[in-house]
Image (cartoon, rainbow, N blue to C red):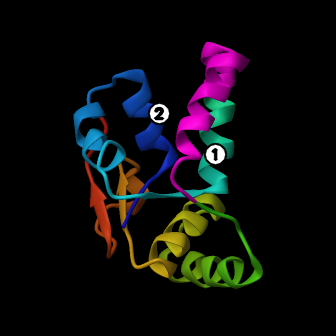
Amino acid sequence: MNLVDSSGWIEYLSGGGNAAFFRTPIESDEPLLIPSLCLFEVYRHMLRHIGREEALNVVAAMRSGVLVELDDHLALEAAELSIETKLALADSIILATTHAHDAELWTQDADFEGLEGVRYRAAK
């Protein structure tokens, strides 16, 4: 299973330099994990840049994946990962979600570079 972090979704949706890298997991037949945190971050970004109606369309497409809400177990795992890796809150939640589902994280966020279970591509 795959998880594309918010930076990957935004890159893909905006047709940025790494859009093709993120096309692989996003357009795959394999279901994607969609953390509720990513819904928040992508919706907020799209709301600012393209407006509410289009942002809601993006979120509707994302909801076709496997939604993962932050629960108490995931929160505690994220806290431990934050201490271990020195990741910020949001990144720790994304990584904990990835690990909890034995998934692979696709990202262009340099904070994840070199971590286990991460497919990283530097932002262009």
Residue at left offset 40%, top offset 79%: 102
Q: Residue 13: image x %, image y %?
A: 43, 27
Q: Residue 117: image x %, image y %?
A: 32, 72
Give the dominant element type of the magenta stretch: helix, strand or loop.
helix
- As measured in the structure, the alpha-carbon distance from the residue carrying label 1 to the one carrying label 2 is 11 Å
Q: Residue 12: image x %, image y %?
A: 37, 32
User: Visible in this render: residue 124?
Assistant: no
Q: Is residue 109 left or right of residue 68?
A: left
Identified by mark 2, the residue type is: Ile
Residue at left offset 36%, top offset 67%: 1
**Along the line of sight, which residue is nearer the eye, 21 or 34?**
34
Please tell me whether residue 48 belongs to the stretch shown in magenta: yes
- All told, the count of numbered labels is 2
Q: Secondary structure at mark 2?
A: helix
Q: Residue furthest right?
A: 72
Q: Secondary structure at mark 1?
A: helix
* Mark number displayed over residue 39: 1
In this rendering, the label closer to the viewer, 1 or 2: 1
Magenta stretch: give its range. 46-66
Q: Residues within 10 Å of mark 1 (few under 14, many from 20)?
A: many
Q: Which residue is mark 2?
A: 10
Identified by mark 1, the residue type is: Leu
In the image, residue 80 above or below residue 30: below
Residue at left offset 31%, top offset 38%: 123
Please tell me whether residue 6 belongs to the stretch shown in magenta: no
Q: Residue 7: image x %, image y %?
A: 46, 42
In the image, residue 84 above or below residue 3: below
* Mark number displayed over residue 103: none
In the image, residue 49 above or below residue 19: above
